[in-house]
Image (cartoon, grey):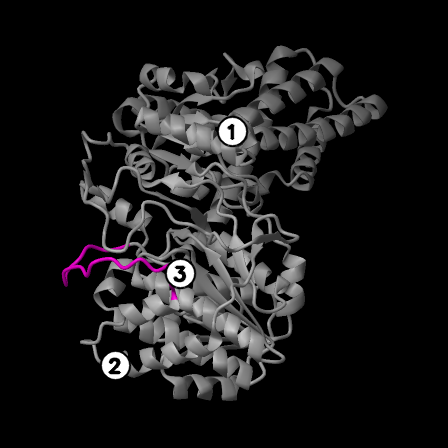
Amino acid sequence: MYPSLKRPIKILVLILLDVASFFAALAASVLLTPAYFRDRLVFLLIAFCTAAVSFVVGQLYRLPVFTAGFAELVRITCSVMGMSVILILIQAVFSVTTWIELWLFLLFFFYFVLCCRFSGRVWRSLRYRQQAYKKYVRVMIVGGGDAGTSVIREMKTSKKTHYLPVCVIDDDKNKWYQRIMDVPVAGGRTRMAEMAVKYNVAEIFITIPSATPAAVQDICGICARIGLPVRILPGVYEMLTGKPMLGQMRDVDVSDLLGRAPVKVDYDAVCAYVRGRRVLVTGGGGSIGSELCRQIAAHDPARLVIFDIYENNAYDIQMELRHDYPALDLQVLIGSVRDEKRVREVFEAERPELVFHAAAHKHVPLMEVSPNEAVKNNVFGTYNVAKAAGDFGTARFVMISTDKAVNPTNVMGATKRICEMIIQYFARHTKGTEYVAVRFGNVLGSNGSVIPLFKKQIAAGGPVTVTHPDIIRYFMTIPEAAALVLQAGAYAKGGEIFVLDMGKPVRILDLAENLIRLSGFKPYEDIKIEFTGLRPGEKLYEELLMDEEGLQSTANQKIHIGRPLSFDEAEFLSVLEQLRAQMDDDKNDLKPLIKRLVPTFRQAPTPPAADRTGDQDPS
């Protein structure tokens, strides 16, 4: 049936049911009071017209068909009450029937209307119960509030769902042993494992959008130990979108296990220096670069220029921003930061006032195999963009750095440390341009990072590969990292290295085990975990601050300032030129020169040509 015809037909069905309810109520009241027949035709006409007006005014024909809930019950009750008041007044003045017949008619009419409107729901509930043990997935609902109730209602009324809510878990003791839409509240979170067995639960839904990160972490930890697949309702703001609750459920992510409060950003400060200005993002198609572009686009720049060598990523973010921000003045340009001529052409044409430099080679093992490429792209790509920013009057230049730049044990980290020194050099010698670097750790879900790799390995049945049982990392979500980069840019005065507070470090093995459990498997039994050994250049832990750097606070507790380091600029420039002269020949070993620039660089042995997918810089 055509969609345009469905609604009128449903309305017609409701009208016919209400007419049938009217005459059934009239017949029942007549049968119970057979002695009175005077003026019954007049009463019928008055009652029919009154009912019709009350139902139309009460908008009963705009309500969902056959899936009525509490809101519909209130609307129907109000409409019948309004009709009753009118008929009672008419009866009091004109005595068109007997009082007993009037009251019986109103009661029967209300009863029959409710039966018709709720019949579909009752039938669906009965059918649901009959089929529950055959094809429906048995679900435990964690959270018996408004969100949980909405999810249960959708499960029970939607034709498209295949879920059966069998029990509710809630820490509010006042709800224990009660029922929410006929689903028992079985106790608090301490009884989750017990109830999962008792009710033969197959999946767990966490429906507490207002829960603190610590509470979500605790619940997710319990779910992981139970070993069942888990889905979660993201947050309070999702409830305001008008979308069905069930459709907003998502898989539990590792970010739910970090157990820390979301990073707060002063968006007023961000807006103040982004709004109305021309902004360039290098590497704008990457994980951090694309998120920077999204958040910059939301703050009304005069123009946003995306510069990236990889056309597919650049095209994807271009299409997304054009859809989400149709009024945005957007320019997407293809090119490499290592191409000095192309970089200067872009700056001359676009004259950006703000530059966010996110372009970089970042995979640790790959850069160990190809150190010359790391130098070309990271070191001299940064040099080209930073110099062009000063030459063409850019007001502020923000470079994305990494915790791997601190006491580096790999080429990638060492080249990023050189990039920080380049930024500090230009900050001292360029008037009118504020140069800063922002240093942070690993980013959850970024391209090539460990979490997507674990998910792929789990989906393939394992094994999940972890380099070392004791390896730890700092983690932050992509939106958090991008937002803090923007705010750090607002604090820039020139020459600072901003250090982002990444919270507590996380053991990678714990992440792997929890991901396996939350996917419904048992670590080491269903999915094996293999330890492959530390890769070339890899540390057991990363540092965000060098020993000799100080630490100053800012208005945002998550952003700190490391004191700029002093270095011999003449020696620095001399060794840079030697690097430039030797980098084009892959036979040249550049590590001794890198060591001269970064004395804390501890060289690792050169790995074989083929290596596993490695850790990466957050940019």
Choose between 372 and 156: the one closer to the eye.
372
Left or right of 589, for residue 308? right
Q: Which label was assigned to residue 14?
A: none
Q: With respect to residue 24, does 617 lie above or below? A: below
Q: Which label was assigned to residue 287?
A: 3
Residue beneath the point at 43% across and 69% down: 419
Give the total of numbered labels.
3
Q: Which residues are magenta?
A: 598-614
Q: With respect to residue 189, does 583 lie above or below? A: below
Q: Amino acid at mark 3?
A: Ser
Q: Amino acid at mark 2?
A: Asp
Q: Please report whichever mark, 3 or 1, sits nearer to the chain's N-terminal start.
A: 1
Queried whether the magenta region covers residue 83, the answer comes back as no
- The residue indicated by pointer 2 is 584
Q: State the separation of the CA atoms marked 3 and 1.
A: 37 Å
- The residue indicated by pointer 1 is 149
Choose between 359 and 304: the one closer to the eye.
359
Specify few, some or many for label 1: CA neighbours under 10 Å numbering under 14, 14-19, or 20 or more: some
Q: Are marks 3 and 1 in contact (CB under 8 Å)?
A: no
Q: Amino acid at mark 1?
A: Thr
Looking at the rendered structure, the secondary structure element under dot 3 is helix
Q: Position of residue 215 (x, y in %)?
A: 50, 30
In the rendered image, the quadrant that contains the C terminus is: bottom left
Q: Position of residue 237 (x, y in %)?
A: 57, 45
Q: Please report whichever mark, 2 or 1, sits nearer to the chain's N-terminal start.
A: 1
Overall secondary structure of the magenta stretch?
A: loop
Q: Position of residue 379 (x, y in %)?
A: 38, 73
